[in-house]
Structures are given as structure tokens and as C-alpha cells.
């Protein structure tokens, strides 16, 4: 599903984002990317979104080398993935329903398809009663669930979440992580970049730890008890 | 592009104007006031030019006819003058008519006794296509002396002064309209840019969700054009209803009653579509350039 082949990223100011990173994520996996600030988590996510281009190496998503995608084809690549950000990034002048529907409108879905799919996905994230509310009328958790609904409404094969629980209280954070797990159970590959080590510890998923742009640990589900070691190595991610 | 997508763009544009109503009203006001100033300068310039043209049309030259030529020769002379380049029209004024005109202008006392032995000659009053060709036409008519031209009466110096003034007014009004239109575009583009800048996060989100540049751009472009259209409609309506009243009021002032203004329909024929088109173009340029900056994500 995702392959990083000796990927490096050096920013214009000389800062190192990633250094010769080799990484492979299987289709249907649930993967945490962990590390301290400046470890390369954000660079990895931004590279996957093709917000930035690598300085070296190749990135393959679903067999396609995304480093060769032209700017005008970028929207079509991004439609293959759902994205969730720490700050929710909802359109404030649209209701919950409209925010979710927007992702379908850009792919020119019919009104009938929108009317069918949006309520379904809102029910999945538990927001069916908030369909007409605007983002400023929602709690942080509800906003993030709206963002999640928008991310999955087109049934993308890949979901990327960048610090999805960063602005949420622990209980709400758990609700979101449970939702992500549900989405993963339905076959979507989920990549979560996070600082929340308590969640990472408890969820028993694959963990990729980065430090200074390099892979320092890649713990599979079967090796989860070793995760404490990663915490020490990445200096309290 | 599918019809429902077009419907969506229009819906989004209108909705966005309503949602961002404060900035929308500010933009409409900026467009309206700028175009109004441009339109007022255009109207002033057009009227000065019209006034000059009116004066010019009254500034023909009188060609006095030799009394010894026959009616057939006089007819041939008229034809020769008519064939001179830049002669717009020619009319015959007989000596009795000329005397009556003189009496009307100078009063009965001035022409008393002249009716018994009228010293005036029959004349052709020659109108020019443009006063700028005065000297050229005068020279050509002078060459017709062997065919019965006795004398040419015209105020060459005044004609030259009028031509110069007319040219200056034309150039100044054109420059002013261009400068003001340019300033308006800058002001309005900046106003729309502020509106779009305030929504850069929105554009950013759209990009991450996978919207194409044109999918994002269209509602903004339509919004800009609609704001421009509304902004252009305000000065168009003010000028339409206000022009007739203003010239009416000016003509009621005894000292200015003689001033002739461009007909209302003529002004509106240009100002109305010009204001609307300028508004739409400004809105289009403003929105396209402003959105472009935020699309590179």
C-alpha cells in the first residue's frame, strides 16, 4: 500500500525532515508513527499528502510513485485518501452535513448519492443528530468526528490522521481512536501520527518510531510488549 | 462540467456573499464608489467634447458668391465645393435672407436703409466634418475664385483655438478615465484579495480534500463577478436617474441656460453597460488573482 524507498527530505533552511527512510505499510494495516517534535513524523505525513516533495528517494502509494505526480493531477491522488488533522480543518460556513457532502461534491457525486452516503457516515461517527449544526456549535470531539466522516465518506483505501487527538480530552481521544479502529476493521489502511503514547500503548498496533528523520524502531503487533523501549528511545514522544 | 456542478458553483457563490456579507458589502461599496468616480469623469469629459462639437458645427465658413455668375455656374460652384474633402454640408443663403439674419442679430437700426440697396452677396455656408481641417478647406475654396468665389469669411484663429481645446479635453478625459479605472482595479482587487485572504484556510482545506483548482476557483470567480456586477449597477443606476436631473437643474440657471448637454439616452447607452462591464471585469480579475495565490498547496 505505502512504500518509502530511501526517502530523504532536507528543507530549504537546511533542517532535516527524513533521512534515507525505508518503510513498507501493508494494505489494511493500522500503523502509528511516533516520535518527538522534529523527529520527522510531520514530514512523513506531508510527503504522503504530497504537500512537499522528497529531496531524494521514491514514495509509492498503491503502486504509484507519487513523486512523479504532476500538480494538476494532485487532486485526483488526494481523493484516494482521507485526511484528518489535529485542528479539524472544517469549512466553518458549512454545516456538518455540508462539510461531509463537500468531499462528495468535488468528485461530482449525484445529489441522490450524497443524500444516501452522508447520513450513513454521520451515523457511523455518531453525529446523525448534529447534521445541521455548524462547526462552531460543536465540541472538539464532534468536530473531529465530522472531519473523520468527511475523510471516509468517499471510502478511500487510505486514511491519514495527523495528531487526531492533539486537541481533545482523553475520553474524547479514545472515542476517536475507537472510530479509527472501526474504520480500519472495514478494510481501510490507517496511518496515525501521534504524540499520545498512552493510546499507542493500549491500542496494540504496529508502531513506527522516528528520531531525527530516521527509523529507530518498527514494532509489529506481535512485539507490542516492547513498546516501552520505544518510549525511552524516542525521549517521551 | 456537469449542470449540477454549475448549479453548485452559483449556489456557493451566492451563499458565500451572504455568509461573508460584511466583506461583500464593503467590496460592493468599493466597486460602486470607484466606478462612480470613473463614470462621472467620463460624463464630464463626454459633455465637454459634445459641447465643443456643437460649437464646431456652428463654426462653418461663409463663401460669398460673385454676383456676375449665372445660376448654372453657381450650381456648378456649389457642386465643386461639395466635392472638397472634409466638407460636411453646404447650404445656400440668398442676400435677402442674409440681411434678415443680420437684422435679427444686430437689430433693426443697424440695417436701416440697407434693404433699399442690399450690399450683401448671396453665400454658401460651408460646414466642416472637423474644424481641424479648416485651413485645408479654406485653401481649396480660395482656389475656386475663377469659378465665382468672391470672398471667404471665417474666423480661422478661433477655429484653431477651439480645435486645440477640443483635443486637450479629449486627451485629458481619456487619460483621467484610464487612470481612475486603473486605480479602481487596484483598490477593488485589494478589497477582494482581503476577502479571499480571510478565507485562505477554507481554500487550503478544499485542496486537502482533493478539490481541483477550478472547483475551488469557480465559486470565488462567480462571487467576484457578482460583487462587481452589483458594484457596477449602483453607479449605473445613479447616473441613469441622476444625469437628467442634474442637466435639467443646470439649464434652469439663467446664466447657463444656453449650454447644451449630451442627450440622456446617449450617455446611458455607454455609461450603463460600461459600469456593469467594468464591475464584472474588476471582480473577475480580483478574484482570479487572489485565489491563485492560495492554490499552491
Image (cartoon, coloured by chain):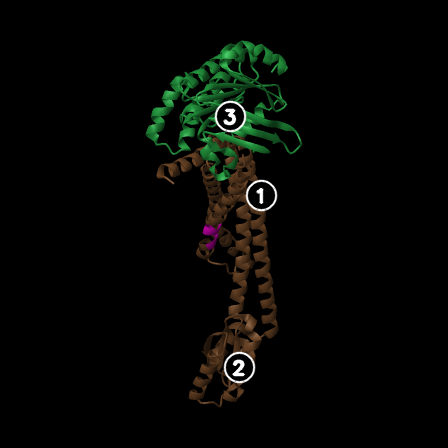
Return the chain for callout 3: A
Considering the image in quadrants, where does the C terminus of chain B appear?
top right
The residue that label 1 is drawn on is: B187
Q: Is residue B273 magenta-colored?
A: yes
| Cβ atoms under marks 2 and 3 closer than 8 Å | no
The answer to whether any part of residue A32 appears in the image is yes
The residue that label 2 is drawn on is: B141
The residue that label 3 is drawn on is: A89
Which element is circle 1 on?
Answer: helix
Left or right: B121 as drawn, with respect to A13: left
Return the chain for callout 2: B
Chain identifier of the brown chain:
B
Question: In the image shown, does A90 or B87 lie closer to the viewer?
Answer: A90
Q: Main secondary structure of the magenta part?
A: helix
Give the residues in magenta.
B270-274
Chain A tint as drawn: green
Return the chain for callout 1: B
Whole-Å distance between the Cαs marked 3 and 1?
31 Å
Which element is circle 3 on?
Answer: loop
Whole-Å distance between the Cαs marked 2 and 1?
55 Å
Look at the picture and state if B60 lies above or below A61. Answer: below
Amino acid at each position: 500500500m505505502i512504500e518509502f524507498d530511501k526517502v530523504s527530505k532536507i528543507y530549504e533552511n537546511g533542517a532535516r525532515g527524513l533521512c534515507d527512510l525505508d518503510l513498507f505499510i501493508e494494505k489494511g494495516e493500522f500503523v502509528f508513527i511516533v516520535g518527538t517534535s522534529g523527529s520527522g513524523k510531520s514530514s512523513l505525513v506531508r510527503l504522503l499528502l504530497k504537500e512537499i516533495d522528497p529531496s531524494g528517494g521514491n514514495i509509492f502509494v498503491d503502486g504509484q510513485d507519487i513523486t512523479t505526480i504532476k500538480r494538476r493531477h494532485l487532486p485526483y491522488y488526494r481523493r484516494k485518501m482521507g485526511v484528518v488533522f489535529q485542528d479539524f480543518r472544517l469549512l466553518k460556513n458549512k454545516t456538518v452535513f455540508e462539510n461531509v457532502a463537500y468531499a462528495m461534491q468535488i468528485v461530482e457525486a449525484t445529489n441522490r448519492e450524497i443524500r444516501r452516503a452522508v447520513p450513513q457516515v454521520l451515523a457511523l461517527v455518531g453525529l446523525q443528530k448534529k447534521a445541521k449544526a455548524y462547526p462552531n456549535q460543536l465540541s472538539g470531539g464532534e468536530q473531529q468526528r465530522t472531519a473523520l466522516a468527511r475523510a471516509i465518506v468517499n471510502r478511500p483505501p487510505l486514511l491519514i490522521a495527523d495528531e487526531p487527538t492533539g486537541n481533545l480530552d482523553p475520553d474524547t481521544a479514545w472515542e476517536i481512536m475507537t472510530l479509527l479502529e472501526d474504520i480500519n476493521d472495514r478494510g481501510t489502511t490507517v496511518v496515525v501520527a501521534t504524540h499520545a503514547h498512552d493510546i499507542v500503548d493500549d491500542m496494540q498496533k504496529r508502531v513506527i518510531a522516528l528520531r531525527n528523520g530516521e527509523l529507530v524502531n518498527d514494532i509489529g503487533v506481535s512485539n507490542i510488549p516492547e513498546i516501552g523501549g520505544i518510549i525511552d528511545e524516542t525521549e517521551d514522544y | 462540467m456537469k449542470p449540477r456542478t454549475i448549479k453548485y458553483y452559483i449556489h456557493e457563490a451566492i451563499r458565500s456573499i451572504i455568509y461573508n456579507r460584511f466583506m461583500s458589502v464593503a467590496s460592493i461599496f468599493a466597486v460602486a464608489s470607484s466606478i462612480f468616480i470613473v463614470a462621472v469623469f467620463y460624463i464630464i469629459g463626454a459633455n465637454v467634447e459634445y459641447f465643443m462639437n456643437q460649437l464646431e458645427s456652428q463654426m462653418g465658413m461663409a463663401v460669398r458668391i460673385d454676383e456676375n455668375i449665372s445660376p448654372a455656374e453657381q450650381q456648378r460652384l456649389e457642386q465643386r465645393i461639395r466635392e472638397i474633402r472634409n466638407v460636411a454640408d453646404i447650404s445656400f443663403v440668398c442676400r435677402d435672407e442674409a440681411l434678415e439674419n443680420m437684422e435679427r442679430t444686430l437689430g433693426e437700426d443697424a440695417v436701416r436703409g440697407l434693404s433699399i440697396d442690399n450690399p450683401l452677396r448671396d453665400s454658401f455656408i460651408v460646414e466642416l466634418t472637423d474644424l481641424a481641417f479648416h485651413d485645408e478647406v479654406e485653401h481649396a475654396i480660395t482656389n475656386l475664385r475663377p469659378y465665382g468665389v468672391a470672398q471667404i469669411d471665417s474666423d480661422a484663429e478661433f477655429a484653431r483655438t477651439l480645435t486645440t481645446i477640443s483635443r486637450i479635453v479629449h486627451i485629458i478625459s481619456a487619460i483621467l478615465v484610464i487612470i481612475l479605472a486603473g486605480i479602481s482595479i487596484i483598490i477593488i482587487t485589494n478589497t477582494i484579495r482581503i476577502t479571499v485572504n480571510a478565507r485562505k484556510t477554507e481554500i487550503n482545506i478544499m485542496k486537502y480534500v482533493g478539490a481541483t483548482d477550478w472547483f475551488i476557483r469557480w465559486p470565488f470567480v462567480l462571487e467576484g463577478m457578482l460583487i462587481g456586477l452589483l458594484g457596477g449597477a449602483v453607479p449605473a443606476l445613479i447616473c441613469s436617474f441622476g444625469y437628467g436631473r442634474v442637466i435639467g437643474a443646470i439649464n434652469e440657471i439663467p446664466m447657463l441656460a444656453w449650454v447644451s448637454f449630451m442627450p440622456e439616452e446617449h450617455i446611458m447607452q455607454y455609461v450603463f453597460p460600461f459600469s456593469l462591464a467594468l464591475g464584472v471585469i474588476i471582480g473577475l480579475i480580483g478574484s482570479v488573482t487572489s485565489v491563485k495565490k492560495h492554490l499552491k498547496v
